[in-house]
Image (spheres, rainbow, N blue to C red):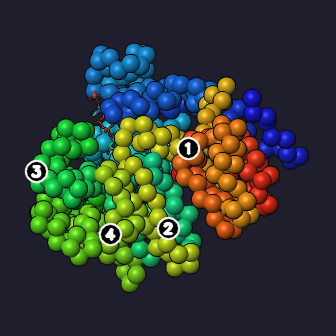
């Protein structure tokens, strides 16, 4: 059991209490594919269902089994609206009918959460204007880099004066470029492998042509306060023409090739997506396989790097749920902790005992470690200290070994986990 923190003397803010105690908040989900089904399951599970009621799930064919209570499914958007949702989550994708549904919800003052970068890249300005006009929140964190909170970071950092945003925002292209560099596969072989492993869509054109990255760049631009950037204005080159020779040449020059989306805000916005030679070992080159990485450069607070998996149903559903939480003012979703947290803290550890090593014989060391139940991988009896790298050991075992050794040496000891 984790003890509750002591209560604070002042009461919680009235508005937050109001939202939580008024009634359960009703959420409707539009689309029940990869992300929509993962989100719907989360909404039906504790602890989320205690705060949010899943009102409807809009699909094309409500007769198909989706592992959800059949009463939730409908193919009629009017029925969703009639259910009086506080929030609509759009996970259909594309422009139509997703855009019409989002616009109608906003016109009725219903908040919207969406993961749809295509819709935002082409119609973000109109939809944000509608949201302002009808005082309805519109949130879209999952539309760029899934659960990596890039839009939230941009919102926070705007006060620091954002000068440049760039990085890898398409995991499919990154997986292909990594497979070409690491396995010596051609573009076609790497693409076929990515498709087989579910890392590329059956129609990968939007990814490999750079269009997906250009759309995400438009969403990033909007989060930086740039108005009017649409995909047609982004100079875009995909990865289809990158050859193995290009990759070998990049390596000879100490570089790797990454599909970099870049928005430069110094002296008027310039946006482009292009295969780029980036320094080996630098933050952009370190994005491996399906990872995304975004660097945010600011005038007053330096550069920030965000990196993580940029797609996947669970991660994307978590990002959407984060927007649902924030939009409805729900506060953090409690982590479900295991009731019997006997977590294994065994790991490799570095034990340092100060004092000359000559005071300790190898026999002393092995007897002390043996008594503590610790196995050494490496022992160094130095002139100023004894250093031992252990095999997997608990903190308690390592401490017992260090105490036994320190009793034979002269100084104190330090134990550090080795990662
Ligand atoms: N997948 C990811 O990892 C990921 C990551 C970040 C962002 N996103 C974004 O999340 C959104 C959803 O992606 P997804 O991968 O979950 O797509 P998906 O698997 O293709 O699912 C789309 C869903 O929309 C439903 N739908 C399509 N047209 C409809 C209509 N006219 N009326 C009602 N429902 C309709 C489909 O219904 P049926 O099931 O009946 O066909 C399906 O359930 C997209 O905007 C995507 O860009 C996805």
Residue 14 is tagged as none
Circle 2 SS class: strand
Label 3 SS: helix
Alpha carbon distance from label 2 to label 1: 36 Å
Q: Is residue 379 visible?
A: yes
- Quadrant where the N terminus lies? top right
Pointer 2 residue: 304
Front-lying residue, 242 or 370: 370
Circle 3/circle 2 CB separation < 8 Å: no
Separation (CA) of disc 1 from disc 4: 33 Å
Outermost right residue:
9
How far, Cα to Cα, is label 3 from label 2?
A: 34 Å
The residue that disc 4 covers is 280
State if disc 4 and disc 1 touch (CB < 8 Å): no
Tell me where residue 86 appears, x and y as whole percent.
Answer: 54, 36
Looking at marks 4 and 2 on the same chain, the residue that comes earlier in the sequence is marked by 4
Left/right of residue 155 with respect to residue 114 in the rendered view: right
The circle drawn on residue 188 is 3
Local crowd at mark 4 within 10 Å, few (<14), some, or many (≥20)? Answer: some
| First in sequence: mark 2 vs mark 1 | 2
Whether residue 225 sits left or right of residue 365 in the image: it is left
**Residue where numbered disc 1 is placed:** 391
């Amino acid at each position: 059991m984790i003890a509750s923190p002591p209560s604070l003397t002042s009461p919680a803010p009235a508005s937050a209490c109001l939202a939580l105690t008024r009634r359960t908040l009703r959420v409707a989900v539009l689309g029940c594919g990869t992300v929509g089904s993962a989100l719907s399951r989360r909404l039906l599970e504790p602890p989320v269902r205690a705060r949010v009621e899943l009102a409807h799930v809009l699909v094309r064919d409500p007769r198909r089994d989706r592992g959800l209570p059949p009463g939730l499914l409908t193919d009629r958007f009017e029925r969703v609206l009639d259910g009086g949702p506080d929030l609509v989550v759009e996970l259909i994708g594309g422009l139509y009918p997703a855009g019409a549904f989002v616009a109608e919800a906003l016109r009725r003052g219903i908040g919207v959460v969406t993961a749809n970068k295509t819709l935002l890249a082409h119609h973000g300005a109109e939809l944000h204007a509608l949201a302002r006009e009808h005082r309805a929140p519109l949130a879209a964190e999952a539309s760029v880099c899934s659960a990596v909170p890039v839009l939230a970071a941009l919102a926070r950092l705007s006060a620091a004066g954002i000068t440049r945003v760039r990085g890898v925002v398409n995991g499919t292209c990154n997986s292909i470029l990594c497979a070409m560099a690491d396995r010596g596969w051609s573009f076609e072989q790497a693409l076929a492998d990515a498709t087989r492993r579910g890392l590329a869509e059956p129609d990968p054109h939007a990814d490999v042509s750079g269009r997906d990255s250009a759309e995400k760049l438009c969403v990033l631009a909007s989060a930086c306060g740039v108005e009017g950037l649409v995909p047609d204005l982004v100079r875009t080159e995909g990865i289809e023409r990158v050859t193995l020779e290009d990759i070998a040449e990049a390596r000879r020059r100490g570089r790797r090739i990454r599909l970099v989306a870049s928005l430069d805000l110094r002296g008027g916005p310039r946006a482009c997506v292009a295969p780029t030679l980036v320094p080996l070992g630098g933050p952009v080159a370190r994005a491996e396989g399906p990872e995304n990485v975004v660097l945010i450069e600011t005038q007053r607070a330096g550069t920030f790097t965000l990196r993580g998996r940029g797609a996947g149903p669970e991660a994307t559903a978590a990002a959407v749920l984060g927007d649902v939480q924030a939009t409805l003012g729900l506060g953090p979703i409690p982590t479900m902790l295991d009731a019997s947290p006997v977590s294994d803290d065994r790991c490799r550890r570095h034990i340092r005992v100060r004092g000359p090593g000559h005071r300790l014989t190898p026999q002393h060391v092995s007897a002390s470690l043996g008594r503590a139940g610790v196995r050494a991988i490496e022992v160094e009896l130095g002139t100023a200290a004894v250093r031992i790298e252990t095999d997997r050991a608990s903190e308690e075992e390592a401490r017992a070994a260090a105490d036994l050794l320190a009793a034979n040496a002269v100084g104190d000891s330090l134990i550090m986990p080795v990662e």
